[in-house]
Image (spheres, rainbow, N blue to C red):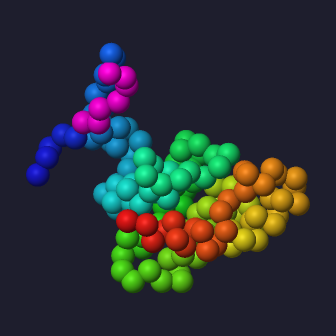
Amino acid sequence: MCKQLWMKAGTHEKPKFIPVNEVIHRIGLDISALKLLLPFHAQTGSDTTSFLPGHSKKTALKVFFKHKELLGELGKEPLTEDTIGNVEQFVCRIYNVPEVTSVDKARVALFKKALRPELLPQTRDALTYHIKRP
């Protein structure tokens, strides 16, 4: 097993190498949270999946640190209604509407606040499809 993991970042001209183990230690992630980083990355936007409009990874990461348990069942088969509901709650918290637990209801609440339609969270159907992506 690898003792030290490095991530290449930066540009071709100025590459940077980030010691992932050190970053994990500094932010205080435990092993259970570490296992959730890939599902978190996939749900909040990666090279192959869409992102949450109007919200950065930094915002999503703050929610992740407080509510990582909501992503605990991602990647497990079969995909259950509870898992989808938990991801919906996670997205609602990112959009700062924690009083609702459905992304469809969050869309309505945010639309009433005059949020531009392109900045609304995806619908439940779109989110479910997004969760199912490999």
Q: Main secondary structure of the magenta part?
A: strand
Give me the residue at 43% from left, 52% from top. 48
Q: Answer above or below: position of 68 versus 56.
A: below
Between 60 and 49, the one nearer to me in the picture = 49
Left or right of 96? Residue 115 is: right
Give me the residue at 65% from left, 49% from top. 53
Q: Which residues are magenta?
A: 6-12
Q: Is residue 118 magenta?
A: no
Left or right of 112? Residue 7 is: left
Q: Answer above or below: position of 25 versus 64.
A: above
Left or right of 95? Residue 109 is: right
The quadrant where residue 34 appears = bottom left
Residue 71 coordinates in the image, percent (x, y): 47, 66
Q: Answer above or below: position of 53 versus 112.
A: above
The quadrant where residue 87 appears = bottom right
In this rendering, the count of numbered labels is 0
- Specify the quadrant that holds the C terminus: bottom left
Q: Residue furthest top?
A: 13
Left or right of 24? Residue 88 is: right
Residue 130 coordinates in the image, percent (x, y): 51, 66
Q: Is residue 41 visible?
A: no
Q: Is residue 8 magenta?
A: yes
Give me the residue at 69% from left, 55% from top. 95
Q: Answer above or below: position of 18 versus 50.
A: above
Residue 125 coordinates in the image, percent (x, y): 61, 74
Q: Is residue 2 visible?
A: yes
Residue 82 coordinates in the image, percent (x, y): 53, 81
Give me the residue at 24% from left, 36% from top. 6
